[in-house]
Image (cartoon, helix red, strand yellow):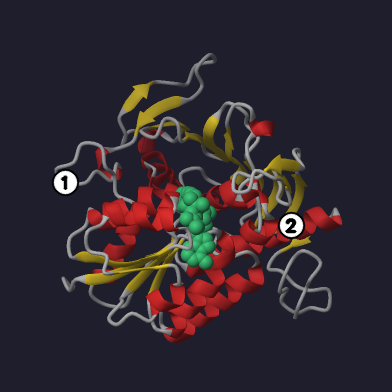
Amino acid sequence: MTNKTLRVGIIGCGGIARHHHVPSYLAVPDIEIVAACDVNPEALSALQQMVSTVTLATSNYRELLAMDGLDLVSVCTTNDMHYPVVMEAIARGVDVFCEKPLALNYAQAREMYDAASERGIKTGVNFSHRRTPAAQLVQEIMASGALGELYHVSAIYAAGWPGYARRPGTWRNDRSLAGFGGLGDMGSHILDMTLWWLDTEITRVAANLRTFVPERVSAATGEPMRVTTEDEGMVLMNYANGALGYLCGSYTFTGRGYDQRAEIYGSEGGLMYDQQHPHLLQVSLPEDLLAQYTILEQGGTRDRPYTTILVPERLHGRLPDQDTARRTILMDFIAAYRADGPFAFSPGFCEGLRVQEVLEAIARGNEEGCWVDLPLQTRNGHDVAEHNGKEEI
Ligand SMILES: NC(=O)c1ccc[n+]([C@@H]2O[C@H](COP(=O)([O-])OP(=O)(O)OC[C@H]3O[C@@H](n4cnc5c(N)ncnc54)[C@H](O)[C@@H]3O)[C@@H](O)[C@H]2O)c1
């Protein structure tokens, strides 16, 4: 275990950098955020107000990555910049913790993964919801094999605020900046979680993506902007273990706030996860496994078939001496980074690439109106490079 002070840079100083990355770094000892970069001076200055150790504040990510003695960089820009920033970091030997989705498309993600692997760069991807206590319990139950032969997975991650159709347009509505809309933004999280829970691969997808609001008023310019990303994506999936899946990633659940739910059923049991109840799980489990958990409401009746169990304290991720703060994926990454022996961490670029490949298959299935097999292949048998009708081999 090394206690060397890690020198960290943050590239992209918007919402996720200031509300998630900075607090995570500040909560662990022996980290110094020494550099920050944003093309928006207000975002850069807001981050500097939070962190006293920044000695380089710049609008040029190359300048930041050229800094002497930089160990690690958080990549928190809009999605279009993940690829160029990460590739430059890798070329300079700087380790990377990158926001999701990893890239705009599979070709970029593949290059990022290959380059990082070749250079021995330590990578993490912020699939942050894996740290929800109930999600940790789902993982524990799934790993026990208690559900038996798996039949069904349905999973939703949707957001929706009042007056959805009238909300201003942002970079998330522009495909050249975001790659995907509701499906890639929200759906990438739940796609990663279901793959993590099931510990298998997706072998086939069919998809339906829809943009309901084709034009918005740009928040940045006040001018009308064409919306080029999907508001909602729905996907049917086959898993390698035989299960069938349904997934929805969307912005269209008007008035619902953030809605992240999943249900998994197998020959011996089932479970229902709802992120709005992060310390509970509804389950139907074999007696011996159920006995290991604290029961809040006993099920097994016609009116209440499911039993509600409490997520054990050990999975809450509470931080010592803090009432509400929870461990984050970034804190787990730092712990792995400091650990003795070979670096091992998940979710890294491997998992980011896996999600990107499924997103690509989904986009292709939607465009062509057909099922798409995974792993991806071009029509003449090589790996696919890019969706959107611009395939490269
Ligand atoms: N893991 C999660 O739960 C989660 C949640 C929200 C956002 N995200 C991801 O985080 C990333 C940022 O999202 P956000 O909500 O913070 O968006 P945001 O718009 O608040 O911030 C993005 C920032 O990147 C900056 N930027 C753009 N181009 C740049 C460049 N060339 N150099 C430096 N800075 C640049 C912008 O000026 C902006 O300040 C996205 O990839 C998004 O998908 C992840």
Q: Is residue 285 above or below residue 94?
A: above
Q: Is residue 337 above or below residue 49?
A: below
Q: Residues within 10 Å of mark 2 (few under 14, many from 20)?
A: many
Q: Which mark is residue 223?
A: none
Q: Is residue 221 above or below residue 335?
A: above
Is 374 situated left or right of 279 in this image? right
Q: Is mark 1 within 8 Å of ligand 1?
A: no
Q: Which residue is mark 2?
A: 363
Is 11 situated left or right of 35 in this image? right
Percent position (x, y) of residue 289?
37, 38
| Three-letter residue code for mark 2 | Ala
Q: Residues within 10 Å of mark 1 (few under 14, many from 20)?
A: few
| Three-letter residue code for mark 1 | Pro
Q: Give the number of callouts.
A: 2
The foreground one among 232 and 192 is 232
Q: Secondary structure at mark 2?
A: helix
Residue shown at 37% from the left, 29% from the top: 309
Q: Earlier in the sequence, mark 1 or mark 2?
A: 1
The foreground one among 349 and 16 is 16
Residue shown at 54% from the left, 38% from the top: 262
Residue 344 showing in the rendered view: no
Quarter occupied by the C terminus: bottom right
Residue shown at 41% from the left, 84% from the top: 92
Q: Secondary structure at mark 1?
A: loop
Quarter occupied by the N terminus: bottom left
Q: Which residue is mark 1?
A: 320
Is 85 situated left or right of 109 in this image? left
Percent position (x, y) of residue 251?
62, 39
